[in-house]
Image (cartoon, rainbow, N blue to C red):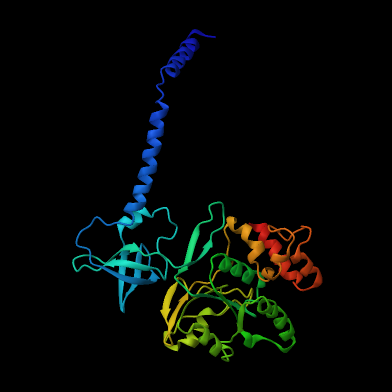
Amino acid sequence: MKQKDKKKTRRWTERIKNVQLPDPDVLDDLKEKAEFKTARIGTKANKSYKEGLELKTGRILEIKSNYYYVVDLNGEIVIAKMSGRLKQFLYQSHTIAAVGDFVAVDVAPAAEKRIEKILPRRNALIRYGTGSFQKEIILAANIDQVIITSSWKKPRFKAGLIDRYLCIIAIQGLEPIIVVNKIDLLKKEEEEELAKQIAYYQKSGYTLICTSAVNGSGMQELKELLQNKESVFTGHSGTGKTSLINYLEPALHLPTAEVSIHNEKGKHTTSQSTLIPLSFGGYLLDTPGIKTISLHSEDKQHIPKVFPGFNRFYSKCKFHNCRHLNEEGCAVLAAVEKGIIPYERYDSYQYLYASL
């Protein structure tokens, strides 16, 4: 080894020997301080250190950009900004506030109207993004029921997407209603296929209605289901959610668009969620159409219990944690073999379970 390399090695060795490590007790103290600071931040998030606040309870009707929200303050519609304090302490949340949230707004005359507090949610409809982090996206808050809107044609009926929605809604403890729209496009030779598709969900205990905003079929029944309820419309793009709303509330004149002739895919006419008061009582939350909806990876353990139609057989399985794949004494597999559960629905279950 060269002389200069020996000097360099000796120099680094001395540096390592001279490192002063803190006492383990000191490290424990630092950990306790960090935990205390975290708890204190959570407490501070629910407090305001500003004086002269004049708080009034309202509800978010629509979300604008840059933390601006349309809020209903007992009939007075205002634009309110999210307070810097909430943005600071809730920066890790993917959705700070959602349409349907009840909030406390500072309406002091000398101040810009600010949302100072988000009140506890009764429930929420949540979907998750794809990828490793699975970003949480709150579609709606404080609702009574979820209207899953599909269409028979343009775009074609997708039972697999309905299965996903029903699983998410069941896991989140919400009430689903399935709407098969554009029934006016149904041909005579397709009636048997439609009856087969909807019979499975009806036998499984779900409320399902067939509608048409063109000829009015099923619209009175839908209106009765919505009356005096707080409902959220969700589903695949192009299924006619906005057309249904325009039929129920003609004065709104919400924009609609035709489905693509080439691929029968819908176009996004609803760009953001909006809470709409209904003239016959209740609220309706219109959400943008989506191509697919993802569950959280942690929801995988619940899928064997909540998948549409499986609840009738799950309790009869030999094992309480049966996955309905190849287990001995599986009541679900037996129902598939007997034709009680269609193979199409079981294939949908396998695909969903494997994707999580």
Above/below status of 104 relative to 85:
below
Above/below status of 231 relative to 279:
above
128 or 332: nearer the eye? Answer: 332
267 or 54: nearer the eye? Answer: 54
Quadrant location, the N terminus: top right
| Residue in the image at 47% along x and 75% along y | 286
131 or 338: nearer the eye? Answer: 338
Q: What is the x, y in percent for residue 71?
A: 34, 72
56 left or right, relative to 287: left
Above/below status of 126 relative to 203:
above
Displayed quadrant of residue 193: bottom right
Displayed quadrant of residue 37: top left
Can you name the residue that lies furthest to the top here? 3
| Residue in the image at 40% along x and 37% along y | 31
Q: Is residue 80 visible?
A: yes
Quadrant location, the C terminus: bottom right
Q: What is the x, y in percent for residue 86?
A: 34, 57
Displayed quadrant of residue 30: top left
